[in-house]
């Protein structure tokens, strides 16, 4: 760990996929976030964790272990969760997917760039971190109460 906060360990985040369920933000970090428009123009996880985004490069991102919160779709339960009823993001995702499908050819260059960045550059970055820094992706346990 890079530090401790009460009974939580703080770890440097080498790579972030989407799906953060909660954030703890320092006063300086919050001031930087609200002073810009990145959050208004992009999804929160993308604005905060995209390594090419100015906001992401200016913030120091750490991860709490165990986690303080978890996303509803990750909860192990016998009940089927209807994310359309419980998430205000799900309709946005559905609409964005529909629009992206309609604009396939206009978005082709971006889609190609995204493919190269995510599947080739990202894969090389993961191998680099794994072999040089001994960084591996792992599930973070959830601390209930």
Image (spheres, helix red, strand yellow):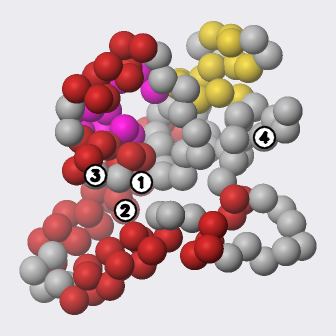
- Classify mark 1: residues with Cα within 10 Å, few (<14), some (14-19) or many (20+): few
- The residue lying at 47 percent from left, 43 percent from top is 16
Dot placed on the residue nearer the N-terminal end, 4 or 2: 2
Q: Which residue is mark 3?
A: 42
> Mark 4 and mark 3 in contact (Cβ < 8 Å)?
no
Q: Nearer the viewer, residue 81 or 137?
A: 81
- The residue lying at 48 percent from left, 50 percent from top is 17
- Classify mark 3: residues with Cα within 10 Å, few (<14), some (14-19) or many (20+): few
Dot placed on the residue nearer the N-terminal end, 3 or 4: 3
Q: CA separation, marks 3 and 4? A: 27 Å
Q: CA separation, marks 3 and 2? A: 21 Å
- The residue lying at 59 percent from left, 13 percent from top is 2
Q: Which residue is mark 1?
A: 123
Q: Which residue is mark 4?
A: 142
- The residue lying at 50 percent from left, 64 percent from top is 88
Where does the magenta region start and end? 48-61
> Mark 2 and mark 3 in contact (Cβ < 8 Å)?
no
45 is higher (above) or lower (below) than 66: below
Q: The N terminus appears in which quarter of the rendering?
A: top right
Please tell me whether mark 1 sits on a helix, a strand or a loop: helix
109 is higher (above) or lower (below) than 137: below
Q: The C terminus appears in which quarter of the rendering?
A: top right
Residue 112 lies left or right of residue 10; in this view the side is left
């Amino acid at each position: 760990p890079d530090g401790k906060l009460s009974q939580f360990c703080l770890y440097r985040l080498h790579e972030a996929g989407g799906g953060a369920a909660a954030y703890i933000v320092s006063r300086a970090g919050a001031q930087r976030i609200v002073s810009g428009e990145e959050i208004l123009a992009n999804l929160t996880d993308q604005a905060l964790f995209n390594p090419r985004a100015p906001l992401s490069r200016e913030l120091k991102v750490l991860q709490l272990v165990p986690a303080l919160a978890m996303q509803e779709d990750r909860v192990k339960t016998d009940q089927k969760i209807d994310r359309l009823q419980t998430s205000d993001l799900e309709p946005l995702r559905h609409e964005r997917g529909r629009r992206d499908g309609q604009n396939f050819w206009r978005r082709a260059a971006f889609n190609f760039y995204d493919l190269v960045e995510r599947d080739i550059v990202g894969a090389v970055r993961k191998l680099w971190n794994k072999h040089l820094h001994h960084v591996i992706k792992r599930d973070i346990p959830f601390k209930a109460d």
